[in-house]
Structure formats: structure tokens, C-alpha cells
Amino acid sequence: MKRDTILSIKLPVEGRALETYTVREPRKFDRPARPFTRIAYAAAHVVADPLSAQEPWLEAAVDWDATIAYRRHLWSWGLGVAEAMDTAQRGMGMDWPASLELIRRTLEAARDVPGAAVGCGAGTDHLAPDPQLGIARVIAAYEEQCAAVEKLGGRIVLMASRALTACAKSPDDYGRVYDRVLTQVKEPVIIHWLGEMFDPALAGYWGCKDHAKAMDVCLDVIARNANKVDGIKVSLLDKDKEIAMRRRLPPGVRMYTGDDFNFAELIEGDAQGHSDALLGIFDSIAPAASGALSALAANDRAAYHDILAPTVPLSRHIFRAPTRFYKTGVVFLAWLNGHQGHFVLVGGQESARNLLHLAELFRLADQAGLLADPALACRRMRQLMATHGVA
């Protein structure tokens, strides 16, 4: 679709130079008029409180009102919220007590929103990784967090465990942990396999450094516990691995793509099936994701790809290596679009990406039609450049 240019801004480029970039009018998206044919969760970020007296490298200071308002924004576009996941800096600034409070507040807010879906991360992050821990302590940690989420009425997303990675001696140890935890949960869970590109401490998960062998271990766990597994979220940034695993899942167990590089084609699927979604990038592109899913529900695949195609380069840029710094780009775009009044992250992670990276993110967001208020976005981009000494 043709979009008129309406503003210009000077942005930094490599070589310590500036170039003029012309910003176009934003793309318009309608709220969904019918249910989607794919389940879609956005892993939601938290809004930091920049006026807190807490030291940002030591404690998580959260602006609860702005954080919950962002969840209402996601629900308004028909998306579910995956709460207290790595996008919310879980284990990367947000500890378990703060995460549980976040889950409690989100579940409370969801009661006022018809149809609002929430998945709640439960893991072992209150347990420090240690090779001497023992599997029993990892199981107890999972049990503690699962019980806390269930007590609040939440649906569990069973997160990967750094503590388990540290102390497991073999794939069988993973089986013991997951078998024990899954037999106790009240409702089917979504298992989250987070790859080492998102969290280096999870390298070798499922007891195997080879992803194909790890997949075998994971699939065996799912097969033994299929009645307690709604689905598996795979975040390996490799579409072929996800498709191969998807085709091997037991009937009724869903694949939730966590592939922020190839989500468009994985969600569309093929003759043998499709992936549902639990994605960090949906936090940033909610209007486009909603519009595309509505087009897919209407079987308008041309419109689906027309909407999502320009969001893929944006997502690949936000999640480029070191992938674990993607939260910086997610929050940056939320700030550009007026969803929060500052570009500050829990843990001070606004400094994790350089100015050239953020300038390219600005360009790609505009090319996807996702700068909702271009004048505001330009003002804020100029403000950021000024703080970096760029006139």
C-alpha cells in the first residue's frame, strides 16, 4: 500500500555521519471483528519506574500502572498476554517475588477484560544455579512457583530452568523433573524451551547440546505427559527445527512458535499443520499482528503477508545477536509510540544497544507502518540523539 511521506529527520549512519530520513504516515489497523484461527500470545515487557529510589542494577522498580496499561493495549488487539517471561526481564532484572506480583496484578486486570487470555511463567529462578543442588531441590522450586500461580488462578507457562541446566547429569534428570512437575499441575501447561541465543545459561537444555537430540528428549517427556501439556513454545530461531518438531507432536499438543525471525511463515503453516504464537515481537507489533491474524482468519493470505512482511526485518533487527538484548528494542519502540513516558528499562538495560542500532530500528518501524504518531516518534528520537551528543 502507498503511504505518503509527512516528516523528515536526520539519523546517524555508520561512518559517524547523519543522513536525512523521510517518515511516512502510519499504517491503519482495525481491531479484530472475529476470533483468530491461531492462538496468539504476546510476551509482554514491564515499564520501569525512573523516579524510584531503588538502585536499578540491584532491584526491579516497576511502574505498575503503566505496565498494566500496556497489557490492556495488547488485549485490545485480541492478543493474549504471556506474563513474567523473558520479555519482562524475568531472571534478567525481575526476580521471582516481583514476577509473582506482576502475575497477580495482570490476572486481576484481566478479570475486567472480556476474553482476556493470560499465561503465567513458572520456573525456578528463586533458586541460584549450582552444580551441587540436586534434582529434588529443582523439583521443589518448580512446585513452589507452580503452586503460587495456580493459587492466583493463573495458567502456567513452564519456563526453562537455569538451576536444572547447572545440576543435571543426563537427559534422564530432565525427564525426572518434568515428569514429576507435570503430574501435579491442575491444568495443561505450555512448556517453554528457551534457546541459548536468548539465555546462554540454558545451553545444552534437555541434557544435549545437539538440538536434534534435545528434541528427542523433550518429545519423550511430552508423549508421556500429553494430557498435561497444552503445547510447547520453541525459541531456537530455526524454522526447520520447529517444523520438524511440530510434525512429531502428539495429537492435540500445540506448537507455539517463539521464532521471532520466521514467525510469519510458521504461523501461516503448511499442508501438514501450523504454529500458534507466543512471541516477544508481538509486544512491539500488536496492531500489525492483530491485523494479519484477522486477515488469516478471513483466508486472505495476500493481506496477511502484506501486513507481516515488513515486520519481519524489524523483528530480525530487534532480536539480532546478542539476542538477549532484544528487550531494549522492545521498550524503545513502546517509548517511541507513546506507551510510556521514558526510555528506561529495569536493570538499566536501555544501554544494551547502541545508537546506530536504535536508529535502524526507527527506520524499520516506520517502513512497517508502526510509528503510530510520527511527530511524537521524531521528537523522541531527536531527544535520544541529543542525550548521546548528536545535534
Image (cartoon, rainbow, N blue to C red):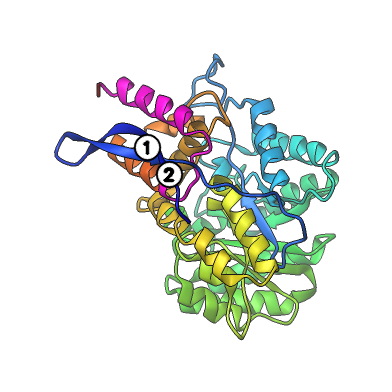
Which residue is found at the position 47% from the left and 41% from the top?
25
In this view of the protein, can residue 200 be seen by the observer?
yes
Residue 368 coordinates in the image, percent (x, y): 46, 51
Q: For the point 31% across and 21% down, which residue is it?
A: 386
Position above or below: 175 against 364: below
Q: CA distance from mark 2 to mark 1?
A: 33 Å
Label 2 or label 1, whichever lies nearer to me, is 2
Q: Position of residue 140 (x, y in %)?
A: 71, 52
Q: Is residue 134 in view? A: no
Q: Is residue 319 above or below residue 275?
A: above
Q: Is the residue 66 above or below the residue 80 in the image?
A: above
Instruction: Please tell me whether mark 1 sits on a helix, a strand or a loop.
Output: helix
Quadrant (top left/top right/bottom left/bottom right) for the C terminus: top left
Tell me the tag on residue 352. Answer: 1
Residue indicated by mark 2:
4
Is 379 rendered above or below residue 290? above
Residues shaded magenta? 367-389
Residue 172 horizontal side relative to residue 19, left or right: right
Toward the viewer: 157 or 359?
359
- Left or right: where 279 falls relative to 114: left
Query: What amino acid is labelled 1 in the image?
Result: Ala
Label 1 neighbour load within 10 Å: few <14, some 14-19, many 20+? some
| Residue appearing at x 50%, y 31% in the figure | 335
Q: Position of residue 65 (x, y in %)?
A: 69, 26
Q: Name the outermost residue toward the left.
A: 15
